[in-house]
Image (spheres, helix red, strand yellow):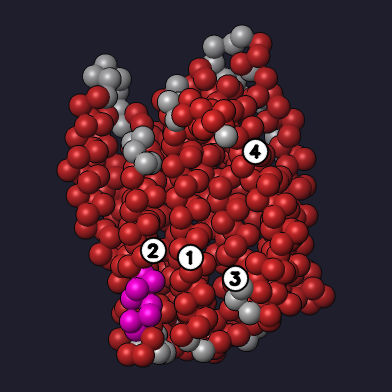
Amino acid sequence: MSRVWGKILVDLRNPLFRQGYSLMANTVITGVLGMGYWLLAAHYYSPEEFGRGQAVITAMRLFASLTALGFVGALARYLPVAGRRTPELILRGYGLAAATGGVAAVGFLLTLPMWGKTYSVLAGFGPGLFFLAAVMVWAVFTLQDVVLTGLRRATFVPMNNLVFGLVKMGLLVALAGALPEGGIFVSWVIPTALALIPVNWLIFGVVVPRHVRQADPVQEPPRLREIGRFLAGDFPGTLSILAIVYLVPVVIATQVGEATFGRFSMAHTLASMIELLAMNMAVSLTVEGSFDRAKLALNCRRALRRAFMIVTPLIAVAILGAPLILTIFGSAFAEEGTMLLRLMALAVLPRVLIEVYLSALRAQSQARMLAIVQIGLAVLVLVSVLALFPFAGVNAVGYGLLFSELLMALLIFGNLRKILKVGETGKATVTQGSSGAA
């Protein structure tokens, strides 16, 4: 045990691991509190309201993330080197994310009858306006963590989400009697809005000024045109990945009943948390690759080793213990979600390779290849899920993810291997082979 603790202490001196471990700790905290939140929701709310709350929150996160998560790669890539333009870059990201998310939410609300009975709870001016505000708030909330990570302050992220999760759980219980038909969604949104105030005070009052003072005065900050070219390649691909994360569950919600969707969502959420652990280390890799391109190959190898070391035992636990884990929420959850949880957990293994490769491409500003890989993966997932759904039901999501991510991992493996070998051959900088991934 002392050797393991000593290894962790050594790792924490490395910004790559310190950032990555902080984000992973955040995922664990969020996951544990999330399970507690949904356990309370299952106890205090009916199965129909449980599923409806899941569906509305999923839709909110989809529209809020349309631009917000599209900026994750750009902020992780350019905030480390933005210098005096750091506040401008952050505010532009906030504004564009909130505005485009709001426009998408308005389109959703205007076409509400097309989205099935589950979303009829949002009909009317009051519920619709609250949903619109929630989308805009969640867009900014999403980018806060990325900003802190891009400025090498990811250690604040777990603390923020710990407080957010606890307040959210308390409000969930408090609203169970006063607002039984909308308490789940309201308890999610109000703490999110409140969290914007202290975190952005920290960002703009403490972290950004310190970052600007420590910036290299000789280094020229990236121009908006350069960032725009990067986004032109990365943004379409990121939107495609969002279709996997958020659009697939929304589509499932239109095809099944509210109670069934609630049981699907728990298996989907648990598996997604394991996937997030792999993505956390990848985001840290992009940040550190932007600070020091010469160490990109070395950091890629380190990130791969640590990511596999952490997620492999969790995948094994999820596969072996899926029925027991889901039984915590009820026997029906285990009956309908066991296979989905196992398939999605297994799909995380190839996803580790894909995420490290994408992060290396972002650090190198390889926008075109980013788009090819991300769009290709999304097309594979969506086509396979839609093709398998009539035969496998909600398990089609698991089969589609596993097949698609295995195939994409095989296609990009050659290029990833070239990146990993650069440091071994003594080259000072990383270059990319010209061959495509697809």
The residue lying toward the viewer, choosing from 244 and 325, is 325
Measured Cα–Cα span from mark 3 to mark 2:
17 Å
Measured Cα–Cα span from mark 2 to mark 4:
27 Å
Contact between marks 1 and 2 (CB within 8 A): the answer is yes
Q: For this view, does 216 lie left or right of residue 330? A: left
Q: Is residue 174 magenta?
A: yes
Measured Cα–Cα span from mark 1 to mark 3:
10 Å
Measured Cα–Cα span from mark 1 to mark 4:
24 Å
**Residue at the image point whose x is 61% and y is 9% from the top:** 426
Question: Which amino acid type corresponds to the residue marked 3 in the rendered image?
Answer: Met
Q: Which residue is mark 2?
A: 165
Q: Residues within 10 Å of mark 4 (few under 14, many from 20)?
A: few
Tell me: residue 234, above or below residue 56.
above
Disc 4 or 3, which lies upstream in sequence? 3
Tell me: residue 55, above or below residue 325.
below
Q: Which residue is mark 1?
A: 34
Question: Which amino acid type corresponds to the residue marked 4 in the rendered image?
Answer: Met
Q: Which residue is mark 4?
A: 309
Tell me: residue 49, above or below residue 108.
below
Disc 1 or 2, which lies upstream in sequence? 1
Q: Which residues, given as a range, are shown in magenta?
A: 168-175
